[in-house]
Image (cartoon, helix red, strand yellow):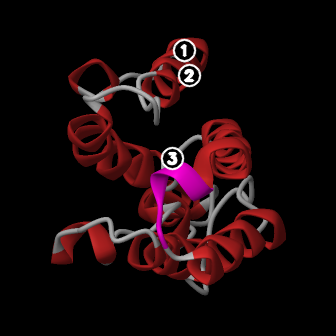
Amino acid sequence: SNESKGCSDVKRLLAIVGVSFNVIQPHLETVDMMKEMTLPFIMTMLLNSYPRVRRYVAEQLFAKLSVDGDALFDDHECLEEANQLLLSVVWHDENDPCGTITEARNRIADLLNIALTKEERNRKIGKRASRSVQDEFESYSALVNASS
């Protein structure tokens, strides 16, 4: 997960996510430790700033839960609800002004008993896009007014 911090290379991020899913093997003794270390990272990647990464993480999590979900998690109903969210949310939206993606990710974390900090729970996608949009001619008009 340290590899991913500040990384802007989408292909690299996709590779990191792929490896993260591969270390969660239900038949290995280390599965509980790997779940504890890897699943919180996967939850953070569901809110990655790159839409392609979010979509890939959701697809991979759905695939992992479909194959190994019953072995990894006890509650079948929670698994079903998590899978429904993974399928129904548009993970690759550019930004998330209503917080739908964040809410869905938080619900998935709750369903799978993955602890998130308050800061992680409140994280939003597309913060940069939600800033007030400035008129591209605003600074130009200020110059014209100043010169007249």
Judged by its main secondary structure, the magenta piece is helix
Residue receiving disc 1: 15
- Residue 100 versus residue 86: which sits nearer the camera? 86
Q: Residue at x 60, y 54 (%)?
A: 69
In primary-sequence order, the first of circles 3 and 1 is: 1
Residue at numbered disc 2: 18
Which quadrant of the view contains residue 5?
top left
Residue at x 17% of width, y 70% of height: 117
Q: Secondary structure at mark 1?
A: helix
| 137 w.r.t. 63: above or below | below
> Disc 3 marks which amino acid?
Ser
Q: Amino acid at mark 2?
A: Gly
User: What type is the residue that disc 1 sits on?
Assistant: Ala
Instruction: Please indicate, yes or no, whether residue 66 appears anywhere in the rendered image.
Output: yes
Residue 122 location in percent, x, y?
Answer: 31, 78
Residue 32's x, y, as percent?
26, 43
Say few, some or many: other residues with alpha carbon within 10 Å of mark 3 (under 14 / 14 to 19 / 20 or more).
some
Of 123 and 133, the residue lying toward us: 123
Question: Which quarter of the image is occupied by the N terminus?
Answer: top left
Residues drawn in magenta? 70-74
Q: How far is mark 2 from mark 1, CA to CA?
A: 5 Å
Residue 71 is a magenta residue = yes
Query: Disc 3 or 2, which lies upstream in sequence?
Result: 2
* Residue toward you, 123 or 82: 82
| Label 3, label 2: how far apart the Cα atoms are | 17 Å
| In-image side of 57 versus 75 (left or right) | right
**Residue 107 in the image: x percent, y percent?**
49, 81
Residue nearer the viewer, 49 or 42: 42
Q: In this figure, which residue is indicated by the disc labeled 3?
A: 49
